């Protein structure tokens, strides 16, 4: 064998690598999948945390529709009072809220936001409205009370954001 004659050497041709498989994915795809899963879980938890607020607002909107349909204002005030108390118990804890009545209940509601419209304004109807004779409660006042309660419920979400931060 001649050392300069390369045709005589036992060399093989260049071997190309096989095609790249799709499994297992590269580490970047695993990181992306983890971030997407974490984002979906965070969205689901946020959606679930606002369930009580959405249910209370939906119920209060149904009261507006019932008032427009001719429902007795006294019955609507009773429903508003019940919805507001249930929501307050779910947000503020059942123990401190369950026993509150009268002015203490209204002061509690006012303490959960910057306004004093429960103790000093339209919210006072929560004390006497559910027990008043049907001719003493005016539908326009109930609509005002319902709007006040909707505002209070929406303010609780902002209040929770400030507490968590």
Image: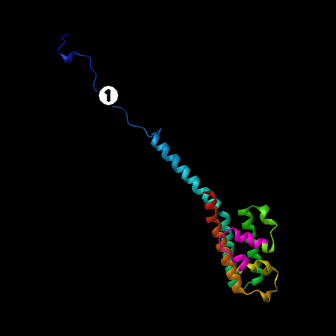
Q: Residues within 10 Å of mark 1 (few under 14, many from 20)?
A: few
Task: Classify 104 as above or below 41.
Answer: below
Give the extent of the magenta segment: 104-120
Task: Classify 89 as above or below 78.
Answer: above
Instruction: Pinpoint residue 87: horizontal percent, then vertical percent.
Output: 72, 67
Q: Nearer the viewer, residue 5 or 73?
A: 73
* Observer able to see residue 113: yes
Instruction: Pinpoint residue 160: horizontal percent, then vertical percent.
Output: 64, 62
Task: Classify 114 as above or below 16.
Answer: below
Residue depicted at x 62% and y 56%: 45
Q: Name the image quarter holding residue 162.
A: bottom right
Residue depicted at x 19% and y 12%: 3
Principal secondary structure, stretch drawn in magenta: helix
Q: Nearer the viewer, residue 18 or 127?
A: 127
Q: Quadrant of the N terminus?
A: top left
Asked whether residue 106 is drawn in magenta, I would say yes
Residue depicted at x 54% and y 53%: 39
* Observer able to see residue 65: no
């Amino acid at each position: 064998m001649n050392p300069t004659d390369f045709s005589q050497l036992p060399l093989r041709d260049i071997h190309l690598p096989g095609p790249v498989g799709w499994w297992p994915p590269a580490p970047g795809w695993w990181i992306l999948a983890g971030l997407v899963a974490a984002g979906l879980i965070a969205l689901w938890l946020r959606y679930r945390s606002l369930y009580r607020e959405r249910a209370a607002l939906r119920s209060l909107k149904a009261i507006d529709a019932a008032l427009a349909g001719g429902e007795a204002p006294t019955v609507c005030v009773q429903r508003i009072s019940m919805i507001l108390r249930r929501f307050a118990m779910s947000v503020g804890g059942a123990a401190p809220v369950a026993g509150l009545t009268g002015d203490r209940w209204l002061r509690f509601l006012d303490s959960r936001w910057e306004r004093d419209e429960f103790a000093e304004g339209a919210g006072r109807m929560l004390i006497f409205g559910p027990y008043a004779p049907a001719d003493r409660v005016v539908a326009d006042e109930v609509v005002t009370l319902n709007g006040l309660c909707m505002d209070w419920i929406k303010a609780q979400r902002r209040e929770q954001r400030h507490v968590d931060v």
